[in-house]
Amino acid sequence: MNEILYDKNVKCPICNNSFSSKKVRVSACVVDRRDEDFCIHYKDFNPVYYEIFVCPHCGYAASENSFDNLSLVELNRIKEMLSGKIVGRSFCDERGINDAIDSFKLALFIADTRGAKKSMIAGICLKIAWLYRELKDEKEMVFLKYALDNYGIAYDKEEMPLGNLDEISVQYLLGELSRRIGKLNDAVFWFNKAVNNPLRVNNPRIEKMTREQWTAVKQMSKKD
Ligand SMILES: [Zn+2]
């Protein structure tokens, strides 16, 4: 196990204490297959389990990318919210899937507290949905819907790209999430937008996926 996981030392921006969090070595992350909503299934070790750093001293939780990236307003909101709270659990050791889900739920709670962008909230919800998918738990659908709702608001209000998703990828993802939760008319609306987006020339993979999933929607509509 030691060759696969390693410790990363982290300093908490909220309480200034240091702690270590496990990470999976890149060489151990072997892709098994990919789902149409960008979920990656790994053969043995899923790096998503360790994506969220959780401070064992104060309970602050966020992804590695956004952990230190706080405005003064956000910092104060989180400090106030966590003040006096008791942290009864550590996420610093090896994590099982339920630890991973709980770490993302903490990150979701913190993101909401800090007033994070809807695209960030959507990304966290999507990862929680993927973890529930691994468990074959129907709560996946609840979090896919949260992801869809928040990406929808982000699409209207935020500047593109949303993280690493360019405009056509967001349109495609809105279509695919709609399809998965059974909103077939909405899925057609978004796939139509993606397939007519001039950015498709730069993104042939997304164009191909859009056409395939559009066909999947048509087949689902026929069954209904
Ligand atoms: Zn802390």
Image (cartoon, rainbow, N blue to C red):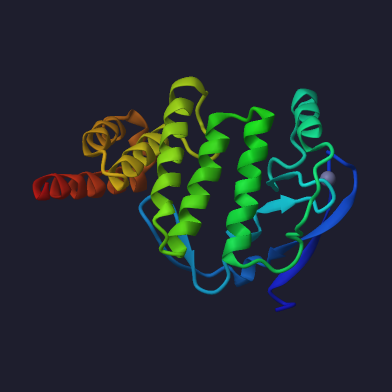
Q: Quadrant of the N terminus?
A: bottom right
Residues 151 and 115: in front is 115
- Name the quarter showing ligand 1: top right
Residues 111 and 208: in front is 111
Q: Position of residue 173 (x, y in %)?
A: 38, 41
Q: Position of residue 28 (x, y in %)?
A: 61, 72
Name above or below for residue 74 compared with residue 146.
above
Picture residue at 20% right of the left edge, 45% below the top: 217
Q: Is residue 33 left or right of residue 179?
A: right
Given the current orientation, which residue lies at the most extreme right position?
Answer: 17
Name above or below for residue 42 compared with residue 198.
below
Name above or below for residue 93 compared with residue 182.
below
Q: Position of residue 40 (x, y in %)?
A: 47, 59
Q: Is residue 94 left or right of residue 102?
A: right
Q: Position of residue 175 (x, y in %)?
A: 31, 39
Numbered marks: total: 0
Q: Is residue 126 left or right of residue 215?
A: right
Picture residue at 81% right of the left edge, 54% below the top: 56
